[in-house]
Image (tube, rainbow, N blue to C red):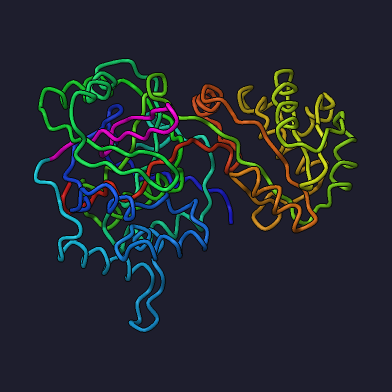
Amino acid sequence: MTAVDHVPSDSSIPSPGGLVLAPFRALRYATTEPRHLARLLSPPYDVIDPASRTALEEADPHNFVRLILPRDDRGGGLSRYQRAARTLEEWRSTGVLVTDREQSLYIYEMASGGTVTRGLLGAAGLAAPEAGIILPHENTMTGTVSDRLALTEATAANLEPIYLVYDGGGAASSVVAEVDSREPEMQATTEDGIRHRLWSVTDPEALAAVAADLLPRHALIADGHHRYATYLAYQADRHARGDGPGPWDFGLVYLVDARAFGPRVEAIHRVIAGLPLDQAVRAASAAFTVTRLEPEPDSALQALAGAGRDGPAFVLSDGDRWHLLTRPDPAQLAAAVPDDHAPAWRELDVTVAHRLLIGQLWRLDDREGIVDFEHDLKAALATARAAGGTALILRPTPVDQVAAVAAAGERMPRKSTLFTPKPRSGLVLRRYDAS
């Protein structure tokens, strides 16, 4: 698979004059009972492994995973996308899902351990990346976009929001902050201990204040690059069919003020199953200073965090042994990381990891099946140990660095950042025929 942008090239496709977040009539679960609702919600499609998928299906016959990761209906002769569409219609017709009467923006909060992430759910006006309104920072892959596009075409819906962050502090942030005085309309605590709460915003003055505040701003895609590429591809397809302006010119987003209610950013580690640790360390030593560490994960992460203050740094492990890589050779670094890219991109640890370490020193093709990803450190170590391979442990990329890369028009390597917590899927979805 190759990296793609899916940017509409047809100049007749409308583009907003700024950051537009429109109210819409959400389709939501009819139940508001917290424990029942918790059994219905699902993590986003791209973090669900096979075992979790089965567990979610078994939690409740109406769990949202059946829409975002449907299975083929071999007995009924339906593709998985057709099955999702049929399931969605059944849930609507039987009252499992109901459509709100009024157009609203929605305030959605995730809280855990004293950390609160809160933002607005709405329909964002779609804009190509070069417009500088909604900024991507990672490349996308054709296979994933094709999958999400087929699901969108079958269901005629935005089933999950993309996650946007912006530098706020204005009226929109005030509207979000002031919701504390109201009881939420929906709330649930999921099995990971995160409390989810939802409020609607229908007051015309509040909606107008939000719209005026957001219009001159821009936002960064924190999570959901493939979904945003899907939005743009679907929009282009509808205009190519001659459908003209319509609800496909908008897409469901979760917009968070990074200063007031910003998310945490965690690293996504790499696992190279086919590269034994000794071989990885030996090749890396041609350009890095290698330091053997004590075989204890917490101390290794502390060493990585400290070393990273002075430049690119990484930890290599097979699950039992640990090595710190620091001070890359300047000449080899310059050769691997070309100066025709912006400084913000060249200075990223993840750029150095992919260009110098993986590509130049390990001489590996940077593709799935060779370089794989794990969000969880324990999982990365377990995978490396089981395969006799190497886990490449990275530091998190700060939000301001991610924003600087996007503002410079650059793209980070795939799976470079993990913004947490992730919005739960199923609280709100957007049908094109009810926008």
Give percent across and percent down for residue 394.
Answer: 68, 35
Residue 180 found in image quarter: top left
Judged by its main secondary structure, the magenta piece is strand
Residue 411 found in image quarter: top right
Farthest residue to the front: give it: 35
**Is residue 146 a member of the stretch shown in magenta?**
no
Give percent across and percent down for residue 428.
Answer: 26, 46
Q: 360 or 8: which is nearer to us?
A: 360
314 w.r.t. 241: above or below: above
Give percent across and percent down for residue 380.
Answer: 67, 48
Left or right relative to 169: residue 98: left
Give percent across and percent down for residue 39.
Answer: 33, 55
205 w.r.t. 32: above or below: above
Q: What range is drawn magenta here?
A: 103-123
Q: Which residue is pictured at 35% across the width and 49% down the height?
A: 425
**Is residue 108 a member of the stretch shown in magenta?**
yes
Q: 72 or 359: which is nearer to us?
A: 72
Q: Which residue is pictured at 29% across the width and 20% down the height?
A: 173
Farthest residue to the top: give it: 169
